[in-house]
Amino acid sequence: MTTLPAGFARHMVDWQKLHGRQSLPWQNTQDPYRVWLSEIMLQQTQVSTVLDYFARFLSRFPDVAALAVAEQDDVLALWSGLGYYSRARNLHRCAQEVMSRFGGAFPSKAEDLQTLPGIGRSTAAAIAAFCFQERAAILDGNVKRVLTRVLGYGEDLAVAKNEKQLWELAQALLPAQPADMPRYTQALMDLGATVCLPRKVQCEVCPVSTLCAAQAQGEPLAYPVKTRKLKRSSATLWLLWAVNGQGQVWLQKRPQKGIWAGLFSLPVFDSEAQLLAAWPHGLEAQYITPWKHVLTHRDLHLHPVRLTGAARQSPDGEGQWVDAQAWPALGLPAPIRQLLQS
């Protein structure tokens, strides 16, 4: 039986007032559109990276209605470089469903928010807590780390029933007063992002160190426990960098499923022979030094080949010639953008 530390929520709320992050652009608002946008952008992405994207996104799409009527290509273009592009596609679909199903107003309950594309249980709880003061627990990676250490919860989180139990404990730790929910939720995020780190702990400045079971054991880095390892795969991709006499680049739109779904890209081939056969009119083959691009579950070994040719002769397959001043505004995978800018 896990013992709940008395006064945990109060310690967290009081600490956040004095030492938590206060000036991020998505804080100090109860606008669910801004909170939702920040929560989606911050998944797997550092705050420092998100800041510029968040500002640009709001400038282009100031509210959910503007995002809902946008073209998917425009959304992906603004997202280009943030990675995990399924987030952008779900963001667009979610905005459309908020308009069609909820009349343009985000629902106030986490249970209803979870029915929208791209919004999982923890994200739904964050929106509901920040904007509507619902007593709903968040449990992203940072929060799992904080709570397993504080509680000394050493069960394997790779086992579904154990994660379910941690959800129940997270709910039990919530402050009694709904008015405390925004600051409490922010406190958990701040503590996990700045103090209770994966490979380094700063117990001396932690507001709940005296309540922390892992600290008492002298083993904070032993938590959380998760044994299942993600299996990594790898793929070798040959990239056709075709340039015509006018300096235009041949780009294809990727399928809606699979790697770089929905983005514009250089044509991708499984082998050098397939690449060269796709544009026999290309001349002066320049083999760019290959490099490895690391995704969450896969390593991509990229082999670009730059060929030049006449504008009237296009590579095989669907695609289009794009002017040098036009392609930077398209939604491009980060490695393709880096290559074209080199």
Image (tube, grey):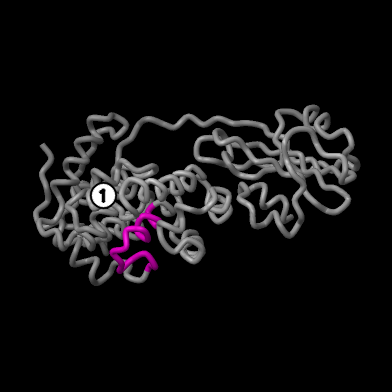
User: Could you tell me which quadrant the N terminus lies in?
Assistant: top left
Span highlighted in magenta in the image: 24-39
Question: Which residue corresponds to the image point at 29% horizontal and 67% vertical from the top-left?
Answer: 20
In this view of the protein, which residue sits in the foreground, 223 or 162?
162
In this view of the protein, which residue sits in the foreground, 100 or 287?
100
Q: How many marks?
A: 1
Give above or below for 289 relative to 279.
Answer: below
Question: Which residue corresponds to the image point at 48% horizontal and 29% vertical from the top-left?
Answer: 231
- Residue 305, horizontal then vertical, whole percent: 79, 40
Residue 220 visible in the displayed image: no
Quarter of the image for residue 276 reads: top right
Question: Which residue corresponds to the image point at 46% horizontal and 58% vertical from the top-left?
Answer: 66
Give above or below for 123 relative to 162.
Answer: below
Give above or below for 49 relative to 265.
Answer: below
Query: Going by the image, does 9 lie left or right of 44?
Result: left
**What residue is pinned by disc 1?**
125
Give above or below for 266 relative to 146.
Answer: above
Would you say residue 151 sits in the magenta stretch?
A: no
- Residue 58, horizontal then vertical, whole percent: 46, 64
- Residue 306, horizontal then vertical, whole percent: 81, 44
Query: Going by the image, does 258 lie left or right of 212?
Result: right
Question: Which residue corresponds to the image point at 17% horizontal and 52% vertical from the top-left?
Answer: 135
